[in-house]
Image: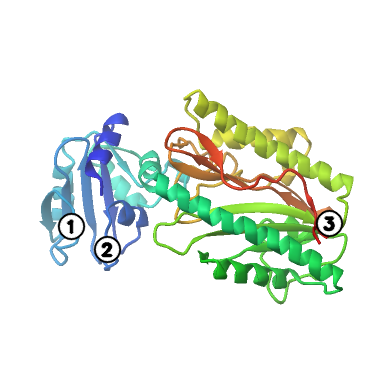
Amino acid sequence: MDLNSIQEALQESQLDGWLFYDFHSRDQIAARVLKIDSRLRSRRWYYYIPATGEPKKLVHAIEPWSLDHLPGQKFIYLPWQQQHELLKNILSASKKVAMQYSPMNAIPYVSVVDGGTIELVRSFGIEVVSSADLVSKFESHLTDEDIQSHIEAGKILQMVKDSAFTEIAKRIKEGQNPTEFEIQCYMKELMELNGLFWEDGPIVAINEHAADPHFEPNKENSFFMKEGDLVLFDLWAKLNKPGSIYYDITWMGFIGNQVPDRLEQIFQIVINARDTGLNLVKERFANKQTLYGWEIDDAVRKIISDAGYAKNFIHRTGHNIGEEVHGNGAHIDNLETKDERKIIPGSCFSIEPGIYIPDEKIGFRSEIDVIINNDLTVSVAGDIQKKIIPILTLV
Protein backbone atom coordinates (compact mmCIF):
# COMPACT_ATOMS: atom_id res chain seq x y z
CA MET A 1 0.00 0.00 0.00
CA ASP A 2 1.31 3.44 -0.95
CA LEU A 3 0.01 5.54 1.94
CA ASN A 4 1.56 8.80 0.76
CA SER A 5 0.01 8.52 -2.70
CA ILE A 6 -3.41 7.67 -1.27
CA GLN A 7 -3.34 10.64 1.08
CA GLU A 8 -2.23 12.96 -1.74
CA ALA A 9 -5.17 11.71 -3.84
CA LEU A 10 -7.57 12.28 -0.94
CA GLN A 11 -6.34 15.83 -0.52
CA GLU A 12 -6.67 16.52 -4.24
CA SER A 13 -10.23 15.18 -4.13
CA GLN A 14 -11.05 17.26 -1.02
CA LEU A 15 -12.04 14.15 0.92
CA ASP A 16 -11.46 13.62 4.62
CA GLY A 17 -10.56 9.99 4.15
CA TRP A 18 -11.07 6.59 2.55
CA LEU A 19 -12.86 3.98 4.67
CA PHE A 20 -12.24 0.34 3.77
CA TYR A 21 -14.56 -2.31 5.16
CA ASP A 22 -14.87 -6.03 4.56
CA PHE A 23 -16.61 -9.18 5.73
CA HIS A 24 -15.76 -12.68 4.52
CA SER A 25 -13.43 -11.34 1.80
CA ARG A 26 -16.21 -9.75 -0.23
CA ASP A 27 -14.22 -6.66 -1.21
CA GLN A 28 -11.43 -7.70 -3.56
CA ILE A 29 -10.69 -4.06 -4.32
CA ALA A 30 -9.75 -3.55 -0.66
CA ALA A 31 -7.70 -6.74 -0.73
CA ARG A 32 -5.66 -5.52 -3.70
CA VAL A 33 -5.22 -1.89 -2.65
CA LEU A 34 -4.29 -2.83 0.93
CA LYS A 35 -2.39 -5.97 -0.15
CA ILE A 36 -4.35 -8.24 2.19
CA ASP A 37 -3.44 -11.93 2.07
CA SER A 38 -5.91 -14.68 1.19
CA ARG A 39 -6.59 -15.90 4.73
CA LEU A 40 -10.32 -15.88 5.47
CA ARG A 41 -11.29 -13.15 7.87
CA SER A 42 -14.62 -14.23 9.33
CA ARG A 43 -15.31 -11.05 11.29
CA ARG A 44 -15.87 -7.46 10.14
CA TRP A 45 -12.87 -5.17 9.91
CA TYR A 46 -12.40 -1.50 9.01
CA TYR A 47 -9.35 0.42 7.89
CA TYR A 48 -9.51 4.20 7.72
CA ILE A 49 -6.97 6.29 5.83
CA PRO A 50 -7.44 9.98 6.65
CA ALA A 51 -6.29 12.67 4.24
CA THR A 52 -3.67 13.60 6.80
CA GLY A 53 -2.38 11.79 9.85
CA GLU A 54 -2.15 8.20 10.95
CA PRO A 55 -4.50 5.48 9.63
CA LYS A 56 -6.70 3.59 12.07
CA LYS A 57 -7.80 -0.04 12.04
CA LEU A 58 -10.72 -1.69 13.75
CA VAL A 59 -10.66 -5.48 14.12
CA HIS A 60 -12.50 -8.20 16.03
CA ALA A 61 -11.10 -9.74 19.21
CA ILE A 62 -11.08 -13.19 17.58
CA GLU A 63 -8.94 -11.92 14.69
CA PRO A 64 -6.83 -9.10 16.12
CA TRP A 65 -4.06 -9.89 13.62
CA SER A 66 -6.27 -9.12 10.57
CA LEU A 67 -4.58 -5.86 9.56
CA ASP A 68 -1.23 -6.14 11.34
CA HIS A 69 0.69 -5.67 8.08
CA LEU A 70 -0.76 -2.17 7.71
CA PRO A 71 0.39 0.98 9.49
CA GLY A 72 -1.80 2.75 11.98
CA GLN A 73 -3.34 2.58 15.44
CA LYS A 74 -5.28 -0.61 16.21
CA PHE A 75 -8.65 -0.77 17.98
CA ILE A 76 -10.23 -4.09 18.99
CA TYR A 77 -13.94 -4.68 19.46
CA LEU A 78 -16.01 -7.59 20.74
CA PRO A 79 -19.75 -6.78 21.08
CA TRP A 80 -21.44 -5.02 18.19
CA GLN A 81 -22.18 -1.99 20.33
CA GLN A 82 -18.46 -1.52 20.88
CA GLN A 83 -17.82 -1.90 17.15
CA HIS A 84 -20.24 0.93 16.39
CA GLU A 85 -18.86 3.19 19.12
CA LEU A 86 -15.24 2.69 18.13
CA LEU A 87 -16.00 3.24 14.45
CA LYS A 88 -17.84 6.44 15.30
CA ASN A 89 -14.83 7.66 17.30
CA ILE A 90 -12.40 6.76 14.52
CA LEU A 91 -14.43 8.83 12.07
CA SER A 92 -15.28 11.64 14.48
CA ALA A 93 -13.06 14.26 12.83
CA SER A 94 -14.38 13.50 9.33
CA LYS A 95 -17.29 14.92 7.36
CA LYS A 96 -16.88 13.31 3.92
CA VAL A 97 -15.37 9.87 3.33
CA ALA A 98 -15.05 7.62 0.30
CA MET A 99 -16.16 3.99 0.34
CA GLN A 100 -16.60 1.23 -2.25
CA TYR A 101 -20.06 2.51 -3.07
CA SER A 102 -21.70 3.83 -6.23
CA PRO A 103 -24.85 5.99 -6.10
CA MET A 104 -27.77 4.16 -7.71
CA ASN A 105 -25.32 1.28 -8.37
CA ALA A 106 -24.17 3.25 -11.43
CA ILE A 107 -20.78 1.52 -11.49
CA PRO A 108 -21.36 -2.02 -10.21
CA TYR A 109 -17.65 -2.86 -10.24
CA VAL A 110 -17.21 -0.40 -7.36
CA SER A 111 -20.55 -0.93 -5.61
CA VAL A 112 -19.29 -3.48 -3.08
CA VAL A 113 -20.10 -2.21 0.43
CA ASP A 114 -23.58 -3.25 1.57
CA GLY A 115 -26.33 -0.72 2.13
CA GLY A 116 -26.52 -1.35 5.86
CA THR A 117 -22.88 -0.43 6.40
CA ILE A 118 -23.37 2.75 4.37
CA GLU A 119 -26.37 3.56 6.60
CA LEU A 120 -24.26 2.95 9.71
CA VAL A 121 -21.56 5.40 8.62
CA ARG A 122 -24.15 7.98 7.58
CA SER A 123 -25.79 7.65 11.01
CA PHE A 124 -22.64 9.27 12.42
CA GLY A 125 -23.43 12.42 10.40
CA ILE A 126 -20.85 11.60 7.74
CA GLU A 127 -21.33 11.99 3.99
CA VAL A 128 -20.36 8.85 2.09
CA VAL A 129 -19.20 9.34 -1.50
CA SER A 130 -18.02 6.90 -4.13
CA SER A 131 -14.41 5.76 -4.15
CA ALA A 132 -14.72 5.13 -7.91
CA ASP A 133 -12.05 7.64 -8.99
CA LEU A 134 -9.72 6.50 -6.21
CA VAL A 135 -10.22 2.88 -7.22
CA SER A 136 -9.48 3.81 -10.81
CA LYS A 137 -6.26 5.54 -9.79
CA PHE A 138 -4.98 2.76 -7.54
CA GLU A 139 -6.39 -0.24 -9.40
CA SER A 140 -5.99 0.68 -13.06
CA HIS A 141 -2.85 2.79 -13.22
CA LEU A 142 -0.17 1.03 -15.26
CA THR A 143 3.57 1.48 -15.04
CA ASP A 144 5.68 1.65 -18.19
CA GLU A 145 6.64 -1.97 -17.49
CA ASP A 146 2.96 -2.95 -17.29
CA ILE A 147 2.29 -1.25 -20.62
CA GLN A 148 5.20 -3.11 -22.19
CA SER A 149 3.69 -6.44 -21.09
CA HIS A 150 0.46 -5.42 -22.85
CA ILE A 151 2.43 -4.63 -26.01
CA GLU A 152 4.27 -7.95 -25.90
CA ALA A 153 1.03 -9.90 -25.48
CA GLY A 154 -0.35 -7.92 -28.41
CA LYS A 155 2.43 -9.01 -30.72
CA ILE A 156 1.56 -12.64 -30.03
CA LEU A 157 -2.21 -12.19 -30.36
CA GLN A 158 -1.83 -10.32 -33.63
CA MET A 159 0.21 -13.26 -34.92
CA VAL A 160 -2.41 -15.73 -33.69
CA LYS A 161 -5.16 -13.77 -35.44
CA ASP A 162 -3.23 -13.59 -38.70
CA SER A 163 -2.37 -17.29 -38.55
CA ALA A 164 -5.99 -18.26 -37.88
CA PHE A 165 -7.29 -16.31 -40.89
CA THR A 166 -4.64 -17.99 -43.06
CA GLU A 167 -5.53 -21.39 -41.62
CA ILE A 168 -9.17 -20.89 -42.63
CA ALA A 169 -8.08 -20.03 -46.18
CA LYS A 170 -5.79 -23.06 -46.35
CA ARG A 171 -8.41 -25.52 -45.11
CA ILE A 172 -11.19 -24.14 -47.33
CA LYS A 173 -8.96 -24.36 -50.41
CA GLU A 174 -8.05 -27.94 -49.48
CA GLY A 175 -11.74 -28.81 -49.26
CA GLN A 176 -11.69 -29.13 -45.47
CA ASN A 177 -14.49 -26.98 -44.08
CA PRO A 178 -13.42 -26.23 -40.49
CA THR A 179 -15.90 -25.51 -37.73
CA GLU A 180 -15.77 -22.41 -35.55
CA PHE A 181 -14.75 -24.65 -32.66
CA GLU A 182 -11.88 -26.18 -34.63
CA ILE A 183 -10.46 -22.77 -35.46
CA GLN A 184 -10.85 -21.74 -31.84
CA CYS A 185 -8.84 -24.81 -30.81
CA TYR A 186 -6.19 -23.90 -33.38
CA MET A 187 -5.94 -20.41 -31.86
CA LYS A 188 -5.81 -21.73 -28.29
CA GLU A 189 -2.93 -24.05 -29.17
CA LEU A 190 -0.95 -21.18 -30.65
CA MET A 191 -1.67 -18.97 -27.66
CA GLU A 192 -0.53 -21.63 -25.21
CA LEU A 193 2.62 -22.44 -27.21
CA ASN A 194 3.55 -18.76 -27.11
CA GLY A 195 3.22 -18.34 -23.36
CA LEU A 196 -0.13 -16.60 -23.02
CA PHE A 197 -2.73 -16.90 -20.25
CA TRP A 198 -6.48 -16.43 -20.63
CA GLU A 199 -9.58 -17.75 -18.86
CA ASP A 200 -12.12 -18.17 -21.66
CA GLY A 201 -12.54 -17.58 -25.37
CA PRO A 202 -11.45 -16.70 -27.94
CA ILE A 203 -14.61 -16.01 -29.91
CA VAL A 204 -14.75 -17.44 -33.41
CA ALA A 205 -18.12 -16.61 -34.96
CA ILE A 206 -19.58 -16.69 -38.46
CA ASN A 207 -22.77 -15.21 -39.90
CA GLU A 208 -25.59 -15.15 -37.30
CA HIS A 209 -23.15 -16.16 -34.57
CA ALA A 210 -21.28 -12.92 -35.30
CA ALA A 211 -24.54 -11.12 -34.50
CA ASP A 212 -24.29 -12.45 -30.92
CA PRO A 213 -21.65 -10.31 -29.12
CA HIS A 214 -20.92 -13.01 -26.53
CA PHE A 215 -21.12 -16.13 -28.68
CA GLU A 216 -18.49 -18.74 -27.86
CA PRO A 217 -18.15 -21.91 -29.94
CA ASN A 218 -18.16 -25.45 -28.65
CA LYS A 219 -18.48 -28.84 -30.31
CA GLU A 220 -22.27 -28.76 -30.22
CA ASN A 221 -23.08 -25.22 -31.39
CA SER A 222 -20.44 -24.67 -34.06
CA PHE A 223 -21.12 -24.11 -37.74
CA PHE A 224 -18.95 -25.43 -40.57
CA MET A 225 -17.23 -22.61 -42.43
CA LYS A 226 -17.69 -22.22 -46.17
CA GLU A 227 -17.09 -19.74 -48.92
CA GLY A 228 -19.31 -16.66 -48.53
CA ASP A 229 -19.25 -16.62 -44.71
CA LEU A 230 -18.59 -13.52 -42.62
CA VAL A 231 -16.06 -14.26 -39.84
CA LEU A 232 -15.49 -12.49 -36.52
CA PHE A 233 -12.53 -13.11 -34.20
CA ASP A 234 -12.41 -11.70 -30.66
CA LEU A 235 -9.34 -12.77 -28.72
CA TRP A 236 -7.83 -11.67 -25.41
CA ALA A 237 -4.90 -12.86 -23.32
CA LYS A 238 -1.87 -11.72 -21.35
CA LEU A 239 1.65 -13.01 -20.81
CA ASN A 240 1.70 -15.92 -18.39
CA LYS A 241 3.68 -13.91 -15.84
CA PRO A 242 2.59 -12.20 -12.59
CA GLY A 243 1.37 -8.65 -13.06
CA SER A 244 0.93 -8.89 -16.82
CA ILE A 245 -1.69 -6.79 -18.60
CA TYR A 246 -4.31 -8.14 -21.03
CA TYR A 247 -4.50 -7.40 -24.75
CA ASP A 248 -7.94 -7.62 -26.40
CA ILE A 249 -8.82 -7.25 -30.09
CA THR A 250 -11.64 -8.00 -32.53
CA TRP A 251 -11.11 -8.47 -36.29
CA MET A 252 -13.38 -9.32 -39.21
CA GLY A 253 -12.87 -11.46 -42.33
CA PHE A 254 -14.88 -12.79 -45.25
CA ILE A 255 -14.35 -16.23 -46.78
CA GLY A 256 -13.93 -15.18 -50.39
CA ASN A 257 -11.65 -13.30 -52.74
CA GLN A 258 -13.70 -10.10 -52.63
CA VAL A 259 -15.77 -8.66 -49.81
CA PRO A 260 -19.38 -7.80 -50.82
CA ASP A 261 -20.02 -4.06 -50.94
CA ARG A 262 -22.85 -4.12 -48.38
CA LEU A 263 -20.73 -5.90 -45.79
CA GLU A 264 -17.86 -3.47 -46.27
CA GLN A 265 -20.20 -0.47 -46.14
CA ILE A 266 -21.60 -1.49 -42.76
CA PHE A 267 -18.14 -2.31 -41.46
CA GLN A 268 -16.88 1.13 -42.45
CA ILE A 269 -19.52 2.69 -40.19
CA VAL A 270 -18.04 0.68 -37.32
CA ILE A 271 -14.51 1.76 -38.31
CA ASN A 272 -15.55 5.41 -38.50
CA ALA A 273 -17.16 5.17 -35.05
CA ARG A 274 -14.07 3.49 -33.58
CA ASP A 275 -11.71 6.08 -35.05
CA THR A 276 -13.95 8.94 -33.89
CA GLY A 277 -13.55 7.69 -30.33
CA LEU A 278 -9.79 7.33 -30.69
CA ASN A 279 -9.46 10.82 -32.16
CA LEU A 280 -11.45 12.30 -29.28
CA VAL A 281 -9.06 10.69 -26.81
CA LYS A 282 -6.01 11.98 -28.69
CA GLU A 283 -7.45 15.49 -28.92
CA ARG A 284 -8.33 15.76 -25.22
CA PHE A 285 -4.96 14.51 -24.00
CA ALA A 286 -3.03 16.62 -26.52
CA ASN A 287 -4.83 19.64 -25.07
CA LYS A 288 -4.50 18.35 -21.48
CA GLN A 289 -8.26 18.37 -21.05
CA THR A 290 -10.30 16.10 -18.76
CA LEU A 291 -12.04 13.17 -20.42
CA TYR A 292 -14.65 10.81 -18.97
CA GLY A 293 -15.55 7.31 -20.08
CA TRP A 294 -19.13 8.25 -20.94
CA GLU A 295 -17.99 10.98 -23.32
CA ILE A 296 -16.13 8.54 -25.56
CA ASP A 297 -19.17 6.27 -25.65
CA ASP A 298 -21.37 9.19 -26.70
CA ALA A 299 -19.02 10.20 -29.52
CA VAL A 300 -18.75 6.66 -30.87
CA ARG A 301 -22.44 5.87 -30.49
CA LYS A 302 -23.45 9.04 -32.34
CA ILE A 303 -21.69 7.86 -35.51
CA ILE A 304 -23.58 4.58 -35.49
CA SER A 305 -26.87 6.21 -34.53
CA ASP A 306 -26.55 8.83 -37.29
CA ALA A 307 -26.03 5.99 -39.78
CA GLY A 308 -29.37 4.48 -38.73
CA TYR A 309 -28.09 1.58 -36.62
CA ALA A 310 -28.72 2.82 -33.07
CA LYS A 311 -30.81 -0.24 -32.16
CA ASN A 312 -28.10 -2.54 -33.51
CA PHE A 313 -25.35 -1.30 -31.17
CA ILE A 314 -26.35 -3.15 -28.02
CA HIS A 315 -23.38 -2.86 -25.68
CA ARG A 316 -21.09 -0.23 -24.22
CA THR A 317 -18.27 1.07 -26.40
CA GLY A 318 -15.44 -0.37 -24.33
CA HIS A 319 -13.96 -1.42 -21.01
CA ASN A 320 -10.91 -0.82 -18.87
CA ILE A 321 -8.08 -3.32 -19.30
CA GLY A 322 -5.64 -4.41 -16.61
CA GLU A 323 -4.54 -7.65 -15.00
CA GLU A 324 -8.15 -8.68 -15.66
CA VAL A 325 -9.49 -8.27 -19.17
CA HIS A 326 -12.30 -6.17 -17.69
CA GLY A 327 -10.40 -4.02 -15.24
CA ASN A 328 -11.53 -1.68 -12.48
CA GLY A 329 -10.77 1.59 -14.20
CA ALA A 330 -13.10 3.79 -16.21
CA HIS A 331 -15.23 1.98 -18.80
CA ILE A 332 -16.28 3.56 -22.07
CA ASP A 333 -19.95 3.57 -21.27
CA ASN A 334 -23.02 5.76 -21.30
CA LEU A 335 -25.43 2.95 -22.18
CA GLU A 336 -25.31 0.21 -19.56
CA THR A 337 -24.13 2.76 -16.96
CA LYS A 338 -22.99 6.36 -17.09
CA ASP A 339 -19.32 5.99 -16.25
CA GLU A 340 -18.30 9.37 -14.87
CA ARG A 341 -14.80 8.29 -13.95
CA LYS A 342 -11.92 10.17 -15.51
CA ILE A 343 -9.67 8.57 -18.11
CA ILE A 344 -6.30 8.73 -16.37
CA PRO A 345 -2.67 8.66 -17.55
CA GLY A 346 -1.20 5.20 -17.25
CA SER A 347 -4.37 3.35 -18.23
CA CYS A 348 -5.62 1.12 -21.02
CA PHE A 349 -9.11 0.54 -22.39
CA SER A 350 -10.84 -0.91 -25.43
CA ILE A 351 -12.87 0.93 -28.03
CA GLU A 352 -15.06 -1.70 -29.69
CA PRO A 353 -18.22 -0.51 -31.42
CA GLY A 354 -20.45 -3.05 -33.11
CA ILE A 355 -23.45 -3.38 -35.38
CA TYR A 356 -25.47 -6.60 -34.98
CA ILE A 357 -28.24 -7.54 -37.41
CA PRO A 358 -29.58 -10.99 -36.44
CA ASP A 359 -32.38 -10.86 -39.03
CA GLU A 360 -29.77 -10.72 -41.77
CA LYS A 361 -27.47 -13.20 -40.01
CA ILE A 362 -24.57 -10.75 -39.86
CA GLY A 363 -22.71 -8.90 -37.12
CA PHE A 364 -19.72 -6.56 -37.08
CA ARG A 365 -17.29 -5.34 -34.45
CA SER A 366 -13.85 -3.75 -34.44
CA GLU A 367 -11.79 -3.53 -31.27
CA ILE A 368 -8.59 -1.69 -30.44
CA ASP A 369 -6.84 -1.13 -27.12
CA VAL A 370 -6.04 2.50 -26.37
CA ILE A 371 -3.06 3.21 -24.12
CA ILE A 372 -2.80 6.48 -22.22
CA ASN A 373 0.93 6.54 -21.58
CA ASN A 374 2.35 8.11 -18.44
CA ASP A 375 3.77 10.96 -20.53
CA LEU A 376 0.16 11.75 -21.68
CA THR A 377 0.72 10.48 -25.22
CA VAL A 378 -1.96 8.20 -26.68
CA SER A 379 -1.10 5.04 -28.58
CA VAL A 380 -2.54 1.77 -29.86
CA ALA A 381 -0.30 -1.31 -29.87
CA GLY A 382 -0.37 -3.48 -32.97
CA ASP A 383 -2.18 -3.33 -36.29
CA ILE A 384 -5.50 -1.52 -36.60
CA GLN A 385 -8.02 -3.03 -39.01
CA LYS A 386 -9.17 -0.77 -41.83
CA LYS A 387 -11.18 -3.16 -44.05
CA ILE A 388 -12.68 -6.65 -43.84
CA ILE A 389 -10.06 -9.22 -44.80
CA PRO A 390 -10.84 -11.24 -47.98
CA ILE A 391 -9.65 -14.50 -46.45
CA LEU A 392 -9.18 -16.59 -49.60
CA THR A 393 -6.57 -14.12 -50.87
CA LEU A 394 -4.26 -15.08 -48.01
CA VAL A 395 -3.14 -18.38 -49.56
Q: Which residue is mark 1?
A: 69
Cα separation between marks 1 and 3: 60 Å
Amino acid type of the residue tagged 1 in the rendering: His
The numbered mark at residue 37 is: 2
The numbered mark at residue 341 is: none
Comparing 394 with 44, the one in front is 394
Cα separation between marks 2 and 3: 53 Å
Work out whether mark 1 precedes mark 2 in sequence or the reverse, and give the earlier one.
2
Cα separation between marks 1 and 2: 10 Å
At mark 1, the secondary structure is loop
In this rendering, would 168 be left or right of 159?
right
> Can residue 93 be seen from the camera position used here?
yes
Q: Residue at x 46, y 32 (%)?
A: 376
Which quarter of the rendered picture does the C terminus lie within? bottom right
Counting other residues with Cα less than 10 Å from the Cα at mark 2, is it few (<14), some (14-19), or many (20 or more)?
Answer: few
> Can residue 142 be seen from the camera position used here?
no
Work out whether mark 1 precedes mark 3 in sequence or the reverse, and give the earlier one.
1
Amino acid type of the residue tagged 2 in the rendering: Asp
Q: Position of residue 70 (x, y in %)?
A: 18, 53
Reply above or below: 142 against 61. above
The numbered mark at residue 393 is: 3
Counting other residues with Cα less than 10 Å from the Cα at mark 1, is it few (<14), some (14-19), or many (20 or more)?
Answer: few
